[in-house]
Image (tube, rainbow, N blue to C red):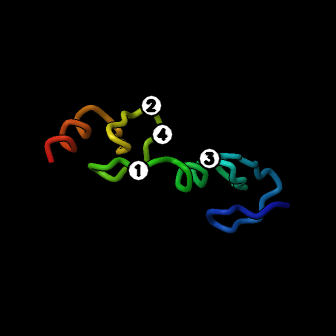
């Protein structure tokens, strides 16, 4: 069994993700998203879709991007 890098759970169906030259083990997509997904610069939610980026700041949607640029 492998131990999840996010929650520490030992799970026989864990999977490995390689990102940015680092290797992670997760027991669920939820843990993977919690650890690896970028955070919206305006509202703080995890960005699981395409989102948008402006000057190395990530936003979950156009509304948050517009609010972040005006801030």
Mark 4 to mark 3: distance in Å?
11 Å
- The image quadrant of residue 35 is bottom right
Q: Which mark is residue 48?
A: 4
Ranked by sequence position, the earlier of labels 1 and 2 is: 1
Label 1 sits on a secondary structure element that is: loop
The residue shown at (70%, 46%) is 18
Ranked by sequence position, the earlier of labels 2 and 3 is: 3
Label 4 sits on a secondary structure element that is: loop
Ranked by sequence position, the earlier of labels 4 and 3 is: 3
Residue where numbered disc 2 is placed: 50
Q: Nearer the viewer, mark 2 or mark 3?
A: 2
Mark 2 to mark 3: distance in Å?
17 Å
The residue shown at (36%, 36%) is 53
Q: Position of residue 17 (x, y in %)?
A: 70, 46
On screen, residue 40 versus residue 9, left or right, reads: left
The residue shown at (40%, 50%) is 39
Q: Position of residue 62 (x, y in %)?
A: 27, 31
Residue where numbered disc 1 is placed: 39
Ranked by sequence position, the earlier of labels 4 and 1 is: 1
- Does the CB distance between marks 3 and 1 fall below 8 Å? no
On screen, residue 40 versus residue 70, left or right, reads: right
- Does the CB distance between marks 1 and 2 fall below 8 Å? no
Residue where numbered disc 3 is placed: 29
């Amino acid at each position: 069994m492998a131990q999840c890098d996010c929650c520490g759970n030992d799970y026989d169906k864990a999977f490995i993700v390689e990102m940015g030259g680092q290797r992670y083990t997760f027991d669920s997509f939820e843990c993977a998203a919690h650890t690896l997904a970028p955070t919206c610069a305006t509202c703080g939610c995890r960005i699981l879709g395409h989102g948008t980026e402006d000057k190395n700041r990530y936003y979950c949607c156009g509304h948050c991007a517009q609010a972040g640029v005006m801030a």
